Image: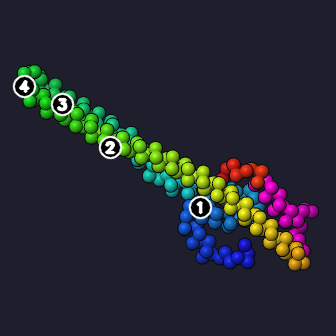
């Protein structure tokens, strides 16, 4: 990674390029702080990405929930109109009653015409976002594995080139990275991101 030219501009482009890019940049920015810090930064970035993906779902869900109630309100108003006509003119004038009944039916139909597609789309987008989140988590774990493996390879290349390994309480940095890779593989990609 050090030799591959990941500078600030490339990281910024990666972050802005896609939701997965934003998550990966969070991990890359904390690559030298250990597995837990890196994983926590990936989780935090993922929560921001999920929040951005879900930003309009609440409005769509509210529309789906309220429009049948608005239709019901129109039905009640229409029926009140019908009963007002009955009390004023009696039941003999069908034309007077038809206006209120028509109003009740139209508002019910209008409420349902908005609510049904709204509910369908709300459920569709909720499922789609959940699918995207699962894919993002899986890809973030895969990329984390690749990142740790490339760091391990760099450590091994440095050791072969004659550089002294960095000791961490008797364990080389390469050994620590190898252990972290094994732990990530053991998680099997099912870890929370």
Under tag 1, what secondary structure?
Answer: helix
CB within 8 Å, label 4 to label 1: no
Does residue 63 appear anywhere in the picture? Answer: no
- Give coordinates of residue 43: x percent, y percent: 64, 55
Examine the structure image and report whether residue 173 is included in the region drawn in magenta: yes
CB within 8 Å, label 3 to label 4: no
Q: Which residue has dot 2 on it?
A: 114
The image shows residue 35, relative to residue 85, as above or below, that is: below
Left or right: where 124 falls relative to 14:
left
Q: Give the Cα separation between the discs numbered 4 and 2.
A: 33 Å
- Quadrant of the rendered structure where residue 66 is? top left
Q: Which residue has dot 3 on it?
A: 101
What span is in magenta?
Answer: 163-184
Q: Earlier in the sequence, mark 4 or mark 2?
A: 4
Q: Which residue has dot 1 on it?
A: 20
Q: Earlier in the sequence, mark 3 or mark 2?
A: 3
- Quadrant of the rendered structure where residue 84 is? top left
Q: Which residue has dot 4 on it?
A: 93
Crowdedness near tag 4: few (<14), some (14–19) or many (≥20) residues, C-alpha within 10 Å: few
- Give coordinates of residue 25: x percent, y percent: 63, 66
Under tag 4, what secondary structure?
Answer: loop
Examine the structure image and report whether residue 31 is included in the region drawn in magenta: no
- Quadrant of the rendered structure where residue 1 is? bottom right
Under tag 2, what secondary structure?
Answer: helix
């Amino acid at each position: 990674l050090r030799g591959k030219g990941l500078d600030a501009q490339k990281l910024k482009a990666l972050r802005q390029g896609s939701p997965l890019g934003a998550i990966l940049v969070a991990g890359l920015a904390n690559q030298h702080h250990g597995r837990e810090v890196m994983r926590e930064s990936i989780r935090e970035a993922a929560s921001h990405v999920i929040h951005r993906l879900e930003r309009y779902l609440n409005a769509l869900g509210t529309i789906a929930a309220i429009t049948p109630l608005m239709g019901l309100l129109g039905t009640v108003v229409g029926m009140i109109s019908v009963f007002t006509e009955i009390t004023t003119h009696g039941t003999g004038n069908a034309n007077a009653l038809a206006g209120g009944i028509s109003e009740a039916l139209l508002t019910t139909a209008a409420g349902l015409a908005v609510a049904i597609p709204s509910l369908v789309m709300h459920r569709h987008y909720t499922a789609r976002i959940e699918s995207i989140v699962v894919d993002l988590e899986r890809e973030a774990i895969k990329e984390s594995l690749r990142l740790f493996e490339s760091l391990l390879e760099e450590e091994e290349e440095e050791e072969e080139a004659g550089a002294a390994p960095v000791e961490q309480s008797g364990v080389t940095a390469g050994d620590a990275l190898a252990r972290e890779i094994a732990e990530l593989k053991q998680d099997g990609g099912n870890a929370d991101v």
